[in-house]
Image: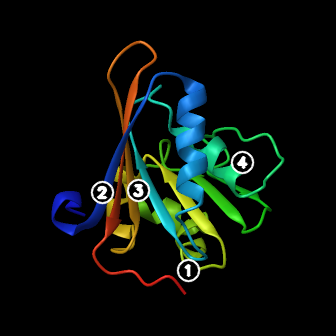
Amino acid sequence: MNSTERAAFRFERVSASPLETLEIGEELAALLWRGSVVALRGTLGAGKTQLVKGLARGLGIPDRITSPTYTIISEYEGTLPLYHMDAYRLRSEEEFIQAGGEELFYGEGISVVEWSERIEGLIPGDAVLAEIDITGPEERRVTIQYPARRENP
């Protein structure tokens, strides 16, 4: 997935704190729709789960959101279902398929995959790419890229 070539719409936000990263996630939720897939990228500690917490808040999900590193997939109910997935511990794309992750990409909710680069071959071509870069002790640069072709049903 060459993110530069496929981006039709791109925006960046600078976060000065975990709270601001949460707010960016909430802003992102308003720009997604049923069936959206969000491929998250960022190093360990970049704030991927914090962004997902904000996304969940934007979807009206009251549950406590935690990283699904060991469970691989966590499901939450809100205005749309949220499928929060983590590919960090997976050894292959086949493991992700066996866990039922790929099937959720084509479900009725919003699928978010942390460490999406580990299953890059499975990420749909119309996925939204969210990259978080650490730019300081608390500062982050969040870049969101939307694909060239995606209709909002």
Q: Quadrant of residue 75?
A: bottom right
Q: Quadrant of residue 65?
A: top right
- Going by the image, does 39 lie left or right of 33? left
Q: Secondary structure at mark 4?
A: helix
- Which residue is pictured at 57% across the width and 66% down the height? 101
Residue 57, numbered circle = 4
Q: Which residue is mark 2?
A: 10
Q: Is residue 20 or residue 69 the one in the foreground? A: 20
- Which residue is pictured at 39% across the width and 73% down the height? 124
- Which numbered disc, 1 or 4, marks the residue closer to the eye? 4
**How many angstroms separate mark 1 from mark 4 (CA)?**
22 Å
Q: Secondary structure at mark 1?
A: loop
**How many angstroms separate mark 4 from mark 3 (CA)?**
31 Å
Say whether disc 2 or disc 1 marks the residue closer to the N-terminus.
Answer: 2
**How many angstroms separate mark 3 from mark 1 (CA)?**
20 Å
Q: Secondary structure at mark 2?
A: strand
Q: Which residue is mark 1?
A: 106
Q: Residues within 10 Å of mark 1 (few under 14, many from 20)?
A: some
Q: Secondary structure at mark 3?
A: loop
Q: Position of residue 28 (x, y in %)?
A: 53, 54
- Which numbered disc, 4 or 3, marks the residue closer to the eye? 4
| Quadrant into which the C terminus falls | bottom right
Please state which amino acid type lies under the numbered disc 1.
Tyr
